[in-house]
Image (cartoon, helix red, strand yellow):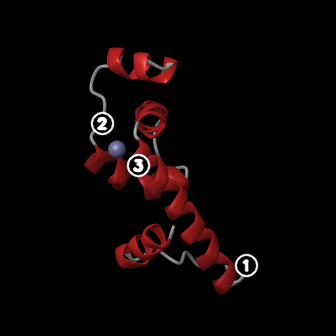
Amino acid sequence: MTRMKVIAAHFPGGMSCRDAEDFIDRYLDGELSVAQKLKFKIHIATCVECHAYLRAYEASRAIAKSIMGEGDEDVGPMPDDLVQAILAAR
Ligand SMILES: [Zn+2]
């Protein structure tokens, strides 16, 4: 058992993959509370699927940003099918 898994096992109210997905956008925008961020990070550190999803999501946001330029406008959440396509291409 890794250290993070031990922490996760003892952390009450650990989040599900579904919750983690909902948190990704706000996590990347820095909008989560400290407690939410901690829960999210523990889940990401212990869940291979969500870790991969976060990486793909980050990458797709970076790509969208570079396409949109250094604009001040919020480009909004990435479409799910784009994220899926990036994940499928790995
Ligand atoms: Zn997960």
Residue kind at label 2, given as amino acid type: Met
The earlier-in-sequence mark between 1 and 3 is 3
Q: Residues within 10 Å of mark 1 (few under 14, many from 20)?
A: few
Q: Alpha-carbon distance for marks 1 and 3?
A: 28 Å
Does mark 2's beta carbon lie closer than 8 Å to ligand 1?
Answer: no
Q: Residue at x 45, y 31 (%)?
A: 42
Mark 1 or mark 2, which is nearer to you?
2
Does mark 3's beta carbon lie closer than 8 Å to ligand 1?
Answer: yes
Quadrant containing ligand 1: top left
The earlier-in-sequence mark between 1 and 2 is 2
Above or below, 9 relative to 71: above
Q: Alpha-carbon distance for marks 3 and 2?
A: 11 Å
- Residue 64: x and y in percent read 59, 78
Query: Residue 22 bears which disc, if any?
Result: none
Q: Residues within 10 Å of mark 3 (few under 14, many from 20)?
A: many
For mark 2, give the secondary structure.
loop
Residue 77 at least partly seen: no
The earlier-in-sequence mark between 3 and 2 is 2
- Residue 50: x and y in percent read 41, 49
User: For mark 3, what is the residue?
Assistant: 50
Q: Residue at x 49, y 33 (%)?
A: 34
Whether residue 12 sits left or right of residue 47 in the image: it is left
Residue at the farthest right position: 70
Query: Residue 15 bears which disc, if any?
Result: 2
Q: Nearer the viewer, residue 67 or 45?
A: 45
- Residue 55: x and y in percent read 54, 56
Q: Residue at x 36, y 73 (%)?
A: 80
**In contact (CB < 8 Å): disc 3 and disc 2:** no
For mark 1, give the secondary structure.
loop
For mark 3, give the secondary structure.
helix
Q: Alpha-carbon distance for marks 1 and 2?
A: 34 Å
User: For mark 1, what is the residue?
Assistant: 70
